[in-house]
Image (tube, coloured by chain):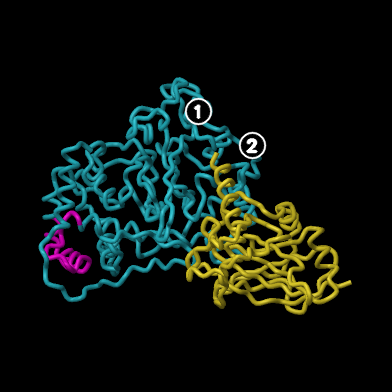
Chain colours: A cyan, B yellow
């Protein structure tokens, strides 16, 4: 995003924060959102200026699934974040509303509430409210394609009567609640509500249900958390990621890793335009460093890695077992295991086929089937079209 | 390397704790710990699964509470059971609130794995996330006949541990206290939770 555009967006967002004082409104649906988390499962950190209410999450859900939020009316957030795919899209590279391909794959929004850093590699982007602006108004690449159409977006939403009530319920103190600031707050609140905590792993580990994990998954769990495989260093903790924060956190860590996926010409380089946080810091040591995504629901989010260049979990394990990927020929040829900027944790390991199957069984046990069908996160427009309750 | 830094940090923390500063590693719901200058007795505890001494310290220094839905219910052995001396018995449990339990069954492969997975005390390494269970086997006059801290939902003693139980001259009581951890600290709302005991004997 260029500087003038960023300034414009900032102004638009800030404009929503400085509205004139208004008389107290009658209490609306300000019931606090309840994630339904089991005991001991961390609660997400919620910004003080965007508290979680049932009304706001519901508004955010409706906006998340609304194609009015794309410039040409063809896409919504859910176009790249489909519930049945754990809020990814199954593509190696996301495709925006104008058909432009994104250099990276769509990330799951599951448990984004816990992330200390958003997107694949942006150490300065830590707010869901800020992040929501990027797909809406970003121009390189175009995703939802709303750049220059801010007023049109507000008009579209204002023309839909149901939104008047929903925005008023979600933002009861605002005289004119249909503003960009509130749109991104509602979407962020919905995203913050999508928490995965009901997988077989969770039932075993948090709920103490001995029948939840298969013998193979238990063996895979032991391997996953072993120093031999080292997986847990980057994909550890309750969220299977090392860039995590939550309510009550006293220490927030944000980590980025070069896993030896590329080593163009032996220089350590990654493909141009997709070089991780190097693109922001321009430090050589940051070449190819990306955030370790959560592994929750990972069996549903293929293809893998930031650019979707590995098709299966089995091949991902091959990549890490080799200590990096070797590409024999072509523009991306190189020996990833020799990448000079590679993480010191990626050293390779040996794994029998049976052990590999066990690790995959464990990773599959991170799938939260209840989340995939949870009506709180489903498409309200589709339900209405089929005659059900929104 | 992060592991090295982590171990150094744990070592430093332990030094502080043992110096009697009473710094709890606990982030428990009520924030209460037994505090004081006396460090908890962790000597001889067997660590199994992914358990470590940092989490055990957190459990032992937090105030346990009685929550029927969160207590560990012992599936095997049953109250009053007499276990054969050979082979070593398997112990299993579940959390009451889940309503789940496993019927008693023999799992030789699992028992072997459990046996191989048991580590000596003072084990560092992977942070504990999720539940950890402190099994305390006691007899009259010895309330620490055998103690095991594990993240799994079953435990089969190795030969040394089993010999302690098999040589007991009085009925043995097993109680299990559990807590929910985040990075080896007791999570907010994570207990520890007291469990009821079962008493059993090991036959001739």
Q: Is residue A164 magenta?
A: yes
Residue ID at (14%, 46%): A149
Q: Is residue A320 above or below residue A208?
A: above
SS for callout 1: helix
Q: Quadrant of the N terminus of chain A?
A: top left
Chain holding disc 1: A
Q: Which mark is residue A350?
A: 2
* Mark 2 → mark 1, Cα distance in angstroms: 17 Å
Identify which residue, B94 or A21, lies in the foreground: A21
Q: Which mark is residue A336?
A: 1
Residue A200 in sight here: no
Q: Which mark is residue A287?
A: none
SS for callout 2: loop
Q: Is residue A132 above or below residue A34?
A: above
| Magenta segment | A156-181
Locate residue B170, reporting x and y percent: 83, 76
Q: Quadrant of the C terminus of chain A?
A: bottom left
Label 1 neighbour load within 10 Å: few <14, some 14-19, many 20+: many
Residue B34 in sight here: yes
Locate residue B113, reporting x and y percent: 72, 53
Residue A10 lies left or right of residue B203; in this view the side is: left
Residue A342 lies left or right of residue B201; in this view the side is: left
Locate residue B151, reporting x and y percent: 62, 60
- Badge 2 and badge 1 in a common chain: yes
**Outermost residue toward the right in this view:** B204
Label 2 neighbour load within 10 Å: few <14, some 14-19, many 20+: few
Chain holding disc 2: A
Instruction: Count the numbered circles shown.
Output: 2
Identify which residue, B86 or A24, lies in the foreground: A24
Q: Is residue A284 above or below residue A374?
A: above
Residue ID at (51%, 27%): A326
């Amino acid at each position: 995003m260029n500087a003038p555009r960023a300034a414009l967006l900032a102004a638009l967002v800030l404009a929503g924060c400085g509205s004139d004082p208004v008389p107290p409104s009658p209490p609306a649906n300000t019931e606090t959102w309840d994630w339904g988390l089991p005991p001991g499962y961390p609660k997400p950190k919620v910004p003080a200026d965007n508290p979680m209410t049932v009304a706001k999450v519901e508004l955010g859900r409706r906006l998340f699934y609304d194609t009015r939020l794309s410039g040409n009316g063809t896409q919504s957030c859910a176009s790249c974040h489909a519930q049945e795919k754990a809020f990814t899209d199954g593509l190696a590279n996301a495709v925006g509303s104008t058909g432009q391909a994104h250099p990276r794959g769509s990330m799951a929004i599951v448990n984004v509430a816990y992330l200390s850093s958003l997107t694949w590699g942006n150490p300065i982007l830590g707010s869901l409210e800020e992040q929501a602006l990027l797909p809406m108004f970003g121009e390189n690449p175009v995703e939802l394609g709303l750049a220059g159409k801010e007023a049109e977006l507000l008009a579209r939403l204002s023309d839909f009567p149901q939104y008047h009530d929903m925005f008023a319920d979600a933002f009861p103190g605002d005289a004119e609640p249909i503003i960009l600031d509130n749109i991104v707050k509602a979407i962020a609140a919905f995203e913050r509500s999508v928490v995965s905590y009901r997988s077989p792993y969770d039932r075993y580990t948090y709920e103490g249900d001995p029948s939840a994990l298969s013998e193979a998954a238990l063996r895979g769990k032991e391997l996953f958390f072993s120093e031999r495989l080292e997986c847990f260093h980057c994909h550890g903790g309750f969220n299977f990621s090392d860039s995590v924060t939550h309510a009550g956190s006293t220490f927030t860590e944000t980590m980025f890793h070069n896993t030896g996926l590329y080593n163009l010409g032996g220089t350590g380089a990654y493909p141009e335009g997709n070089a991780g946080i190097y693109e922001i810091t321009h430090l050589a040591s940051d070449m190819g460093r990306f955030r370790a995504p959560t592994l929750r629901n990972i069996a549903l989010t293929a293809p893998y890695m930031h650019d979707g260049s590995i098709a299966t979990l089995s091949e991902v394990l091959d990549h890490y077992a080799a200590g990096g990927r070797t590409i024999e020929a072509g523009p991306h040829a190189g020996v990833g295991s020799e990448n000079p900027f590679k993480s010191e944790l990626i050293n390779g390991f040996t794994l029998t086929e049976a052990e590999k199957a066990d690790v995959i069984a464990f990773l599959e046990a991170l799938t939260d089937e209840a989340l995939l069908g949870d009506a709180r996160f489903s498409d309200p427009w589709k339900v209405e079209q089929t005659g059900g309750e929104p | 390397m992060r592991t090295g830094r982590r171990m150094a940090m744990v070592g430093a923390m332990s030094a502080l704790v043992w110096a009697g500063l009473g710094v709890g590693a606990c982030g428990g719901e009520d924030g209460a710990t037994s505090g004081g200058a006396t460090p908890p007795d962790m000597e001889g505890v067997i660590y199994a699964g992914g358990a470590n001494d940092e989490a055990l310290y957190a459990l032992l220094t937090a105030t346990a509470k009685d929550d029927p839905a969160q207590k560990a219910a012992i599936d095997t052995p049953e109250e009053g059971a007499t276990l054969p001396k050979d082979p070593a018995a398997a112990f299993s449990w579940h959390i009451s609130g889940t309503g789940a339990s496993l019927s008693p069954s023999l799992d030789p492969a699992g028992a072997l794995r459990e046996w191989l997975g048991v580590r000596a005390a003072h084990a560092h390494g992977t942070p504990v996330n999720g539940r950890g269970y402190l099994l305390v086997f006691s007899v009259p006059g010895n309330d620490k006949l055998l103690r095991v801290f594990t993240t799994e939902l079953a435990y089969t003693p190795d030969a040394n541990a089993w010999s302690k139980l098999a040589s007991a001259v009085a009925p043995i009581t097993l109680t299990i206290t559990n807590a929910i951890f985040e990075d080896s600290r007791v999570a907010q709302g994570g207990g520890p939770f007291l469990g009821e005991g079962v008493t059993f004997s090991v036959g001739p």
